[in-house]
Image (tube, grey):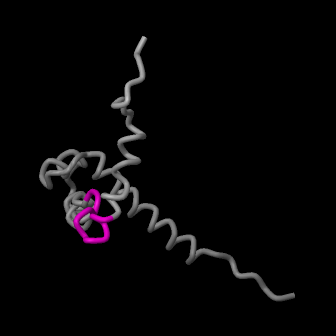
Amino acid sequence: MRRATPFACNRSTISHKCRPERAKAKAEGKYRGGIPTARAKAEQVFAVVDAGKTRGEAAKELGISIQSVFRILRTRKDAEKAVTRIRTRPRVSAS
């Protein structure tokens, strides 16, 4: 059985103590979180896949994971669906 010591810390205690420092760093522009590098290559992914290469080949060529390729292609598919839905909306006549 573990004894409670004055120096015992768990993950929530550590993150709670780091919160003020993280807020200060964000205010200074030093803490930005992860930079979305794969999504910045979206146009290149579209071009490579449209050229006939597989998703795996596109991932290797661009230096990103295959899951990122699938995510990028899914966002394009969702955007195309939204445009199609807008175009094919039936008109309602005022009666």
Q: Is residue 38 above or below residue 80?
A: above
Image position of 45 (left or right of 90): left
Residue situated furthest right in the rendering: 95
Nearest to the observer: residue 31 or residue 65: 31
Horizontal and vertical percent position of residue 79: 44, 67
Q: Main secondary structure of the magenta part?
A: loop
| Residue 45 located within the stretch drawn in magenta | no
Q: Quadrant of residue 44?
A: bottom left
Report the front residue among 9 and 86: 9
Give the image location of residue 68, x and y in percent: 29, 51
- In the rendered image, the quadrant that contains the N terminus is top left
At horizontal 75% and vertical 82% (from top left) the residue drawn is 92
Residue drawn at (19%, 52%), measured in percent from left and top?
Answer: 58
- What segment is highlighted magenta in the picture? 24-34
Q: Is residue 46 visible in this depiction of the protein?
A: no
Q: Residue at x 22, y 60 (%)?
A: 37
Q: Is 26 in the magenta? A: yes
Q: Is residue 93 left or right of residue 95?
A: left
